[in-house]
Amino acid sequence: MFGVLGASGFDIETRNHAKAILGGDFAEEIEGLVTALLSFRIPSREIIKSGGGQAASTMRLRDALYAQGWHKHEFIVRTIVDGVEREATTHEVDHVKRCSNGTLALEIEWNNKDPFFDRDLENFQRLHAQGAISLGVLVTRGAALQVHMTRIVVSAIRSEGILSATELEAWGMKERTARQTKNLNALLEKQVPFADAFAQSFVADKYGAATTHWAKLDDRIKRGVGNPCPLLLIGLPLASVGDYSAANEELYE
């Protein structure tokens, strides 16, 4: 079921019998999800221009899921005692797929602060305990993609022939903050080439260790966050960056 994703470089993990549940009750829905994931591509330029969770590329993935019926939904859980509502909590999930055999919930964390993983997994846990969902799915940057992020940015900047912050802004990069500019200038003063200096400071700032990526998700899963909800965890591969190849690494050396 997930072999084609693994062969394409995706990180895949399942927890709490998720694989059996998906294969038995949601095979058609997962086939559609796999198709959307295999089609997902993000140009390196968009990695540089936008770091947040609503980047153009992730919106394309979201739109593909919306087209398959994975709609945003706000779950409302009410506690009623003797006909009187005592408490109500809400849980908004970006992608919910209602099926004949149950309900699937999916979140994409392309680039948020890593505590968003706790929020998502704990939401899945609560919704599963209430019988509102059958299984939770989390999609984030995969391990190889995270490791190569600096090299991806170096390759993109060099391929565009950008040699200064002014040229970078003309290319479409938003204006940097004073702190970001200071960090970049500190590297340039050490005679680090512009592409390398920008990539190091940019990736550390926008895609650093404290953001949502596979290692941070894996850490939470190993600690049992989200249990006992069945979980499917997906890390987007390096191949998702359509205009980058590991063969370009000599540009980084």
Image: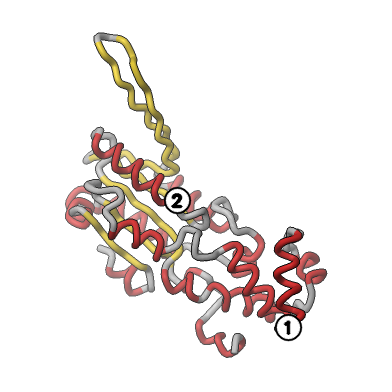
Residue flagged by tag 1: what amino acid is it? Lys
Q: Do callouts 1 and 2 mark residues in contact (Cβ within 8 Å)?
A: no
Which quadrant of the structure image shows residue 171? Answer: bottom right
Q: Is residue 214 left or right of residue 225?
A: right
Image coordinates of residue 24 in percent, x first then y, are: 17, 52
Q: Secondary structure at mark 1?
A: loop
The residue tagged 2 is: 115
Q: For the point 75% across and 66% down, which residue is it?
A: 181
Q: For the point 64% across and 66% down, which residue is it?
A: 48
User: In the rendered structure, which disc, 1 or 2, sits on the residue that comes first in sequence?
Assistant: 2
Image coordinates of residue 79 in percent, x first then y, are: 30, 20
Residue flagged by tag 2: what amino acid is it? Pro
Which quadrant of the structure image shows residue 191? Answer: bottom right
Q: Secondary structure at mark 2?
A: helix
Q: For the point 45% across and 43% down, which residue is it?
A: 94
**Separation of residues labelled 1 and 2 (CA atoms):** 35 Å
Q: Is residue 155 left or right of residue 161?
A: left
Image coordinates of residue 220 in percent, x first then y, are: 34, 56
The residue tagged 1 is: 190
